[in-house]
Image (tube, rainbow, N blue to C red):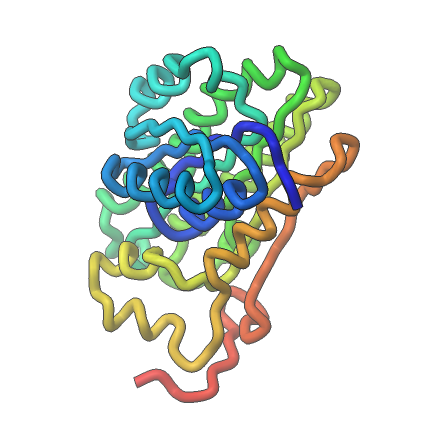
């Protein structure tokens, strides 16, 4: 697959976002990479330039900061301003507490990142796509946007919101030539569980013990495939899970986790 346009990826410093950067770079894209950690963005840009000759433009900001998002995207140099694909990847989970014992700060972080951050990035990029009559928004959702599981009420709510925003945006953009898709992974081994459990590596590792999870590259390959369909084809939604996973809570494991 090849892609010659400009792609903006949020949360490109790790996990699925970083893998998407590598996949689009290998396909020939120019990349606007965003994230909170500029040193990671720079290291990734250096790697992609050496491997593929990829042109990159780096934007260091937190998607929760509305003014920073609008200023960064609105301040793109003219040669970078025409975004062909927006990959709304930035997101996180915090904790597995029941609502009655929930961490309110964690709730705010999830809602502000997974929902409001996605909206800010979309609002910043979308007018240009509409004006040019082309473009593609690809949101990273989750199986948690289709199911709810114990201890995941707020995280699942944010991913249900991503699904609702995706469907509503597709309606709002009807007739503009802009496409809207969502890629919804199941269990992918990234930093997600380490972040969710506040750095508890042992607890995070147990999430994937005894089964074969998806990799970030699996999801990036799917995102690239969605982006490279012909202009008259819109992939509305893809749910992608490991073979060892049947639902959000039903997982086959070859051994019982300790």
Residue 61, above or below 15: above
- The single residue placed furthest to the right in the displayed view is 232
- The single residue placed furthest to the bottom in the displayed view is 255
Q: Nearer the viewer, residue 195 or 106?
A: 195
Q: Nearer the viewer, residue 160 or 217?
A: 217
Tell me where residue 136 sits by quadrant.
top right
**Is any atom of residue 231 visible in this view?**
yes
**Is any atom of residue 100 visible in this view?**
no
Q: Is residue 132 left or right of residue 46?
A: right
Q: Position of residue 16 (x, y in %)?
A: 44, 50
Query: Residue at 51% across / 44% down in the picture?
Result: 140
Q: Position of residue 181 (x, y in %)?
A: 62, 39
Query: Residue at 63% across / 33% down in the picture?
Result: 180
Query: Residue at 26% across / 53% down in the picture?
Result: 102
Query: Residue at 59% across / 59% down in the picture?
Result: 240
The quarter of the rendered structure image containing the C terminus is bottom left
Q: Nearer the viewer, residue 162 or 61?
A: 61
Q: Position of residue 133 (x, y in %)?
A: 68, 16
Residue 44, above or below 119: below
Q: Position of residue 64 (x, y in %)?
A: 31, 31
Q: Is residue 168 left or right of residue 111?
A: right
């Amino acid at each position: 697959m090849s892609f010659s346009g400009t792609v903006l990826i949020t949360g490109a410093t790790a996990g699925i976002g970083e893998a998407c950067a590598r996949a689009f770079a290998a396909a020939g894209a120019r990349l606007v990479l965003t994230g909170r950690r500029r040193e990671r963005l720079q290291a990734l840009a250096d790697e992609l330039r050496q491997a593929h000759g990829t042109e990159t433009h780096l934007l260091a900001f937190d998607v929760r900061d509305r003014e920073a998002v609008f200023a960064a995207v609105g301040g793109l140099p003219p040669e970078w301003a025409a975004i062909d694909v927006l990959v709304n990847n930035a997101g996180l989970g915090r904790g597995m507490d029941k609502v009655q014992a929930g961490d309110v700060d964690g709730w705010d972080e999830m809602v502000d990142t997974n929902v409001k951050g996605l909206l800010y990035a979309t609002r910043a990029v979308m007018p240009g796509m509409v004006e040019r009559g082309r473009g593609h928004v690809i949101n990273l959702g989750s199986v948690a946007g289709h199911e709810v599981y114990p201890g995941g009420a707020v995280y699942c709510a944010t991913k249900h919101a991503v699904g609702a925003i995706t469907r509503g945006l597709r309606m709002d953009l009807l007739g503009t030539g802009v496409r809207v898709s969502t890629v919804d992974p199941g269990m992918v081994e990234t930093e997600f569980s380490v972040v969710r459990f506040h750095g508890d590596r042992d607890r995070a590792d147990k999430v994937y013990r005894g089964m074969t999870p998806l990799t970030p590259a699996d999801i990036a390959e799917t995102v690239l495939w969605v982006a490279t369909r012909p202009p008259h084809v819109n992939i509305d939604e893809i749910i992608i899970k490991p073979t060892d996973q049947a639902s959000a809570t039903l997982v086959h494991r070859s051994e019982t986790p300790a």
